[in-house]
Amino acid sequence: MRHVQFALPWAFALAFLCAPLVASASGSARSSGLPEADVTIGEVIRDIEQHRTEDALKRIDALLLRHPNFRLAHLIRGDLLLARARPLSAFGASPDAPAEKLSDLREEAIARLKAYRNKPPSNYVPRYLLQMEPDQKFAVVVDTQRSRLYIYQNDNGRPRFVADYYIAHGKLGAEKTREGDKRTPVGVYHVTANLPRQKLSDFYGSGAFPINYPNEWDRQQGRNGHGIWLHGTPSDTYSRPPRASDGCVVLTNQDLDALSGYLQIGLTPVIISNTIEWLSLDDWASERAALNREIEAWRRDWESRDVDRYLAHYSRAFRNNEGDYAQWAQQKRLVAAGKSWIKVDLSKLSVFRNPGKEDMIVVTFEQDYRSNNLSNTLKKRQYWVKEGGRWKIIYEGFA
């Protein structure tokens, strides 16, 4: 086989940027779940580093047969062909290519190569998935900095990695605050609908899954906007650059089709973060247990009918749709005065750490309330924040 001399800085420039995600004591890493495009791009870079450029070209040609609209693969193929005539030291060496387009494709190449070379260790999980309710079969976690979407299965309460996919997000990054800011929101959301291809323009590809941005906390913070979806790409496009949407999370059509099999409308959490925090399973279990103790203490103190003990679980900055802490406290004291007994049971409990700047958790549950003069069953959601080293409820309302 003829080996073409290819200047190594081309591949090294990409590999150099791929620092490890987290250190693992065992050194073991997840070895499966990557889509074929990421695996192929990673193998091509490896072939180039080892001077096997003809093997790299064969891999790229095979990939393009399956995905003829994959622009990044076309760019790499062009570089490989140019390398037969002269050494290349830059990624995307075609003199006629627009600089902006090349920059976008370089960013996509780096994002895909990071996913291939630096996988989260198998004994680490995203910090946010503290507890999924039994009916939630899967959870989605998005890392905007790495342009990656991860799927975790609810394995008897423990999150177990299933797959991950390359994604594009907002043109101006994350932390959406207002309509039209071209940013992707950060927070805990849920899938609210399934919009099939037939009801959408070609721009959204094979379909779309809206999420509930703005959520309760977003609205309390004055954040606005709408139409944040997980969706696909136009029929003439395989993938988009990492920062290419007006705020949505965009996957290839092939990956969106795969993702759709894991999504439950109204149930599946979609947690979007600037960058994922990873915990060892031991630390995850410890943090989960501590938070469940806090929730149980709140439930028990409510049953006690000791209003001061109950209200001690609420932040003085508490606010919901009816008013502030003072109004909440007054209402609870009036209600408690008419109670001779209270029984509260919680079921379908989920606990997710909010990935935003606040030290916050989002708690959702079905509440079965019984007392001497009232009984009801409600689905509720609370937001808890850390104040003075103790967790306090800062928002509570219907879910």
Image (tube, grey):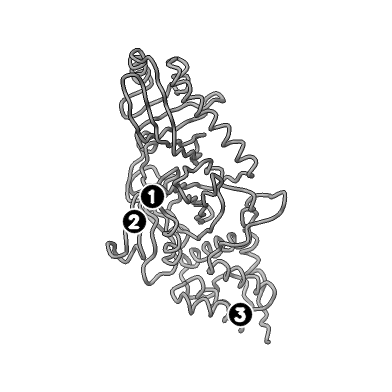
Disc 3 to disc 2, how far (Cα)?
Answer: 46 Å
Q: Secondary structure at mark 1?
A: loop
Residue contact between numbered discs 2 and 1, judged by CB atoms under 8 Å: yes
Percent position of residue 280, x then y: 64, 44
Which amino acid does the dot numbered 1 rest on?
Val
Disc 2 to disc 1, how far (Cα)?
Answer: 8 Å
Residue lying at 37% horizontally and 47% vertically, measured from the top left = 266
**Depth check: 85 or 168 in front?**
168
42 horizontally vs 71: left or right: right
- Identify residue for label 3: 83
Location of residue 345 with respect to 168 vertically, above or below:
above
Location of residue 218 with respect to 111 vertically, above or below:
above
173 horizontally vs 122: left or right: left
- Identify residue for label 1: 191
Percent position of residue 144, x then y: 49, 52
- Identify residue for label 2: 194
Q: Earlier in the sequence, mark 3 or mark 2?
A: 3
Few, some or many residues within 10 Å of mark 3 (<14, 14–19, 20+): some
Percent position of residue 393, x then y: 45, 27
